Image (cartoon, helix red, strand yellow):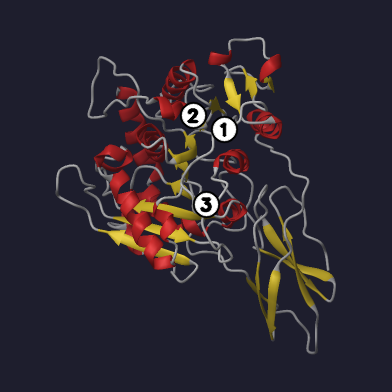
Amino acid sequence: MRLLSTLLAAGAALLCCPRAQAQKAPYDVYPAIAAPYFKVRFEGSSKPGELPYPVQYTLWLPPEVKTLRGVIVHQHGCGEGSCKSGLTGAFDLHWQALARENDCALISPAYEQPDKADCQLWCDPRNGSAEAFKRGLKELGKQCGHPELETVPWALWGHSGGGHWAGGMVLTHPQRVAAAWLRSGVPLLKADDKRSTIKVHQVPEAALQVPIMCNPGTKEGVSVKDGRFAMVWPANEAFFTAMRSKGALIGVAIDPLTAHECGNQRYLAIAWLNACLKQRLPAKAGDDKLQPMPQQGAQLAPLMGQQALPAAEYKGDAKQAIWLPDAATAKSWQEYVRDTAVSDHSPPPAPTDLEVQGRQLKWKARADLESGLAHFIILRDGQPIATVPEKPSNPFGRPIFQGLQYSDTPIQPLVKMEFEDKDASAGQHRYDVVSVNSAGLRSDDP
């Protein structure tokens, strides 16, 4: 169990950026909340078994949805800096595209874990965070007028300690989880001789039917065998081996470019979750009964390999092989584990609701489900004059419009879809805005 203690402690240290460390409480910088966004905050409890840290849940609801079919959870990792990043998770346009595609709400918890405090007190769901989460869903359901939010299935994404939490929710609430993506962090299934405060999980039979993807970075113990995150891969490998040997629907996607940062994982994670949700969410909106994952289209790949095959053609031991839900997802997985360049051939949706007041432009846009949003091109009288942002950047992967924090959430303050044409000459001009996704594809030009 020392390896998970090391991982969580290292995650807390690395995820606290210098600016966050300088702040005593980074949890008071909330983005503005108005429908279709909703939030609820609970104080920490001193009662045994209840969550000791305050927590805020921010929810985004697709405005056009009449009855929800599920909820997608984007869970940050350990440490003050990572907890702060959770405040913007529900505002992520790319994750909203996944939620909208499947008539789901998108929720981002933000645990107010003090600096150097024990992450296990929230990232183990048995320590009160599971009950706080369910309470949050109930309260948010009342706020947004969707009481079914309390009972619909969950799709879980978690980073580091958030991966430990998401995996723990699969093992403690398998009947509620449609699928789970575990970036770096995984639950512990077997104790070792060096015990710690981390509790071992049991594996119920129902958990074997929940699609799971483990997603470590190669520099977390695969290609780099030392350093603060070298124990991540052994933990992931042990979890995968134990689960797959029991017949679990579990895969591994090793990020070939990164250490503990999230990198470009969203381009596979969103595609993978979408494939699972299409099969598993209840056929009737508002229902709470998950459908079994079909196996006829599944593909398999060797644990450290880069080539997947239809299950019927796979010659190795299936109970040691990576499980992938279908051929399309397997193709994306092959691209990801090679160089993370998951391909996309469909242009993003065009911007809407362009408003021009003098030299000031404002518009709305939805992200491309496959590749999100990288930037916008501003056209004046049919000629390009600027991009928004001017110089798209992202230290962790493909440049994206909203920027990217370490835990895969938008930067603060949130970037706005607006532009001032300071160089416009006097007179009337026609303006247009073009969306560009992270694969470089443009929405239809006017």
**Circle 2 sits on which residue?**
209
- Residue drawn at 77 percent across, 59 percent down: 443
Q: Would residue 214 be visible to someone looking at this image?
A: no
Residue 417 lies left or right of residue 58; in this view the side is right
Q: Earlier in the sequence, mark 3 or mark 1?
A: 3
Q: Dividing the image into 4 quarters, which one contains the N terminus? A: top left
Q: Amino acid at mark 1?
A: Met
Residue 68 lies left or right of residue 389; in this view the side is left
**Circle 1 sits on which residue?**
293
Residue 171 falls in which quadrant of the image?
A: top left
Task: Name the spot of residue 26 as percent of width and height, x first.
Answer: 33, 58
Task: Name the spot of residue 340 as percent of width and height, x first.
Answer: 65, 35
Residue 43 falls in which quadrant of the image?
A: bottom left
Residue 330 falls in which quadrant of the image?
A: top right
Q: Which mark is residue 69?
A: 3
Residue 71 lies left or right of residue 367; in this view the side is left
- Residue drawn at 63 percent across, 29 percent down: 337
How crowded pointer 2 is (Cα within 10 Å; few <14, some 14-19, many 20+) is rated as many
Q: CA distance from mark 3 to mark 2?
A: 19 Å
- Helix, strand or loop status at disc 3: loop
